[in-house]
Image: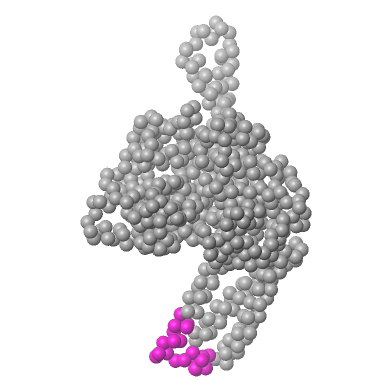
Amino acid sequence: MASYLQIENISKSYGPKILFEHIGFNVNEGDKIALIAPNGTGKTSLLRILAGKDKSDSGGKILFLKDIRIAFLEQDYSFDPEKTIFRQIMDSSVEWTKNLDSEHLFAYERRVVQILTDFSLGEGERLMGDLSGGEVKRVAITEMLASEADFFIMDEPTNHLDVDAIEYLENILKRSRCTLLMVTHDRYFLDRVCNIVMEIDHGAVYTYKGDYENYLEKRTERIDLYNAETDKVRNVLRRELEWMHSTPCARSGKAKYRKNAFYALKDRAEDTYTVKSVDMSEMTRKGTYLGNKVIDCKDVSFYWGGKCYLDRFSYKFQRYERVGIVGKNASGKTTFLNLLTGGWDPSMGGELTGTIERGDSLIVGYYHQSGIQFKEDQTVLETVNDTHLLSMFLFSHDMLNTPVARLSGGEKRRLYLLTILKQEPNLLILDEPTNDLDIVTLNILEEYLMEYKGSLIIVSHDRHFLDRLVDHLFVFCGDGVVKDFIGGYSEYREYIKEVDAAKKASQKAIEKASKPDSVPLEKEKKKKLSWKEARELEALDKEIPELENEKASIEEKLSSGTLSSDEIIKASNRYSEIKALLDEKELRWLELSEI
């Protein structure tokens, strides 16, 4: 494999803080590398240096293979709000497209339109200024993918994307023969796209071939080995210490280099490697009483600018319930959260009908997608005056007096999250909490939420996050329709795939029956179905509607909020049984219908 990129001796610091120092690594053709590290340790800085947007403090070498084309996806995409989507992309890519002949330029334009269409952005006629954050991200990715560059450098490509867009990008990169280096916190995306994990740790770079689980195993082995070597160094240090404490006369006759070596040995012996982790037990034991009434919604509808975002929604949220909310960008998820929490009033525009009642004991902790505006001149400690909590969430002692203005975007997000958790809410609402958080912090947050003593509502496009934390999903389908699905996100996607497959099979059967030269379906059945098969088909015609009615009845009961814990478990189990039976019987019905 050709070497696409060679890095030697590059460093980056901000003031006294060293991000990485004299690092080097190699990227070969076909490598798909996920770069991971805690926030504030230099991931984005490294990518910007590679893309020529920043410089190494120590000079060093950055050598790309001659004539390869590089596409760089930054977290923030610069654009002109007055331009159309299509014109924005074409103008942004003019540096390399100006060298294309008419045929290749036309091919590029077709690729742009095709990807925009796949991303549900039409053919690019809308103005950039009218787009949501997620739509702007899709425009940036379209520009990158359409370029068909040899080497993609991507900084958090899945941030602000809905799951459909994430899976679309995932499938393209998985099938592509491109070479890529990306920062990502999405563990499913990482495992399905990348074949190498690269870590920045204590200013150095470590590379692991394989998936995320393999990285965790090999990293643990590396740390254990390092600490074992530290123990050996300490044994040697004890002997050297005895020599240093010997009589001045004896010591003065020793070589000066041995004294210098002693101090170097002492520094190494004190360098025990500790893995940062958080003990959530103290925080999770703290709980604020939550009564039986959390939030009751009855026939709630919401319209804005002629568009329906919620249509006659009724639901009673329960104590200790864990709800995930998914749906396409701009389908009304954040609007829904604002309605639940009372963050909307008539002066803001829009029309709200129905009732939303909140329990008297309710204390809401609402982590907004947009974050909060910090006082940039305040220190970390002044923002959250609790050294114990700050330490638990990976703000080390030497960071406490750091002004907020000097924190990375991810560190500010982590600090904002801590201000929410510190309130000890009994209803925690998280709107896209995984954006801009590193994998280390995500694991910590997940462990906290697993033990959280309260009700939980999460809007997220992180599939791993939802699978671990929620019991059921509200799926925002558009036009105000919200469906309740019992189970995690991966279960929901499998269900959708099965439904889509059944629809395709049904459509295929209809098309086959409608062909002029085909035998009418009813006559064909009478010709080819055996007596036993005909009776089986008749039975299925009765059983499937009965199961569908029972399924709908259970869904209604589960949504009512009137069931006890035992009844919810029993109903959920039966729901799973019915779903499996329906899948089996509908498939059999299709098989018999095609005979």
Residue 228 seen in the figure = no
**Which of 560 and 463 lies nearest the eye of the viewer?**
560
**How many callouts does the rendering have?**
0
Which residue in the rendered view is the most extreme toward the top? 249
**Which of 442 and 529 lies nearest the eye of the viewer?**
442
Q: In this view, does 87 lie to the left or right of 355?
A: left
Residue 308 spot, x, y in % from top left: 56, 65
Q: Residue 490 falls in which quadrant of the image?
A: bottom right
Residue 579 seen in the figure = yes
Residue 372 spot, x, y in % from top left: 57, 43
**Which of 195 and 19 lies nearest the eye of the viewer?**
19
Q: Residue at x 37, y 44 (%)?
A: 27
Q: Residue at x 37, y 56 (%)?
A: 84
Q: In this view, does 55 lie to the left or right of 269?
A: left
Question: Is 542 above or below relative to 244?
Answer: below
Residue 470 spot, x, y in % from top left: 63, 57
Q: Is residue 526 magenta?
A: yes
Q: Is residue 385 magenta?
A: no
Which residue in the rendered view is the most extreme toward the left? 101
Residue 447 spot, x, y in % from top left: 64, 47
Which range is magenta?
508-529
What's the coloring here? one colour
Q: What's the magenta bit mostly, secondary-structure-wise? A: helix
Q: Residue at x 32, y 62 (%)?
A: 110
Q: Residue at x 58, y 67 (%)?
A: 481
